[in-house]
Image: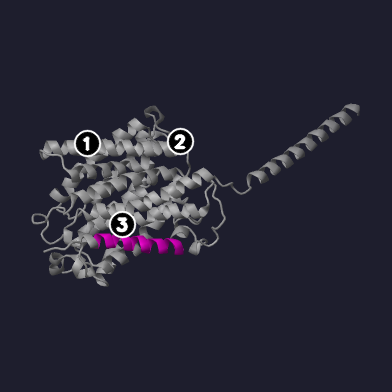
Amino acid sequence: MVRRHITGGLNGARLFSCVLMAFLLASGGAQAAEPAKLDGSATAWVITASALVLFMTLPGLALFYGGLVRARNLLSVLMHCFVIACLVSILWMAFGYSLAFDPGTPLIGSLGALGLAGIRGHVSASGLPEGVVALFQMTFAVITPALIIGAFVERVRFSFVVWFSAIWLVLVYLPVAHWVWGGGWLAALGTLDFAGGIVVHTTAGVSALVAAILIGPRDGFPTHLEPPHSPGMTMAGAGMLWVGWFGFNGGSALAADASAAGAILATHFAAAAAGLAWIALERIRLGKPTSVGIVTGCVAGLATITPASGYVGPSAAAVLGATGGIVCFFAVNWVKGRLRIDDSLDVFAVHGVGGMLGSLLVAVFALPILGGAGYGHDAAFATQLGTQALGVAAVALWSIICTIAVVKLLAATTGLRVSVEEQREGLDLTTHGERAYDLV
């Protein structure tokens, strides 16, 4: 009886201890659920990165593309970039951010943040005000459809650019951003895309190729086209893109830390290696390295490193960039020379091929044995490579389907092309009533 009483007393003490422990754990859980604290340094960096990414479109991409077209179409290219920046910004505020990043289904977000309602004062888990997250992601949404215009410059109606960009954003960009970055089905599978190799470059590149095929070539393609009117302008724009890409990739760490620094280092070395690889091939095949060639190579390297920038070391980044420069060089010649597709400014061959290549090779160069950061989850190399391939294939297929639908719809409504006479006169004057230069 005495032993039972003692045992019962011990069991009672253990029960009390368990209850006390459960209470303490519950209290700790309640404390862990407190709102995230603002990270001032991260906030300042991501605001700066947002400005850098917008700078990539205005004026970086505008000048990069503008120098590559004929002088009588320069203003039309600048107009395309500006109107897309204005249009996408308003759509992003109205419902784009909500559909891409508000929690919802595996396929699309909810409408809980319409008009960016309710984000004021809210701090995300990363320590950033949600308004800063929305701002940063908006700049990505702006540049993605702006990239596509390079495929059909000098021959499309201004109304087509406006409607295509708006509808494409809704059908392609917002769902894919949710799939990969907004907690959607590709994120659940473990797809890696640090800064947009899939979300930005695969969608834009594949859609650009499809649009170029459906719209058809410029008057005079491929044998009677004039050369770029201002390679110097293109080089200046490319320099802005390179600098802005520090925000594009470094800002995607959403922190001012070693990950951001590593992404920026990887970005720089990849661009440098790709530019050198491109002009080396030009020297071998054409006899001379060109100004347009080196900057195109740099952009190819930047597109290739984008999905991997936060996961690879500096040496691997240089190898990845050089690989991108070489592959994209031959892709340009294949699309225009062999396939005879007038993707005017090589959007698919540079951005699409580079982005898809980098998205696949991140499974290789992220391996710790190669100096990478690993996958961040328990996945074998073969599994991660398969996941990356699935992500690229699914997004490419979705981009193809939606782009065909949008172009066919607009062909039956607003129309696609300007007349041959308008092409020869130039879109600056015939569409906008202005000239970039006093042409004689």
Of residues 256 and 310, the one drawn nearer to the viewer in this rendering: 256
Image vertical order of residue 265 relative to residue 335, above or below: above
Is residue 249 rendered to the left or right of residue 329? right
* Label disc, if present, on residue 277 of the rendered structure: 1
Q: Does label 1 or label 2 sit earlier along the sequence?
A: 2
For the residue marked with disc 3, what is the amino acid?
Answer: Ala
Is the Cβ of the residue at disc 1 closer than 8 Å to that at disc 2? no
Asked whether residue 88 is drawn in magenta, I would say: yes
Magenta residues, start to end:
76-95
Q: What type of secondary structure mainly makes up the magenta span?
A: helix
Is residue 288 rendered to the left or right of residue 171? left
Q: Residue at x 74, y 42 (%)?
A: 23
Q: Is mark 2 on a helix, strand or loop?
A: helix
Mark 2 Cα shell of 10 Å, populated few (<14), some (14-19), many (≥20):
few
Q: What element carries label 1?
A: helix
Mark 3 Cα shell of 10 Å, populated few (<14), some (14-19), many (≥20):
many
Q: Name the residue under label 2.
A: 258
Asked whether residue 206 is drawn in magenta, I would say: no
User: Which image quarter is the N terminus in?
Assistant: top right
Please provide percent x and percent y for residue 61: 29, 53
Of residues 340 and 262, the one drawn nearer to the viewer in this rendering: 262
Q: Name the residue under label 3.
A: 146
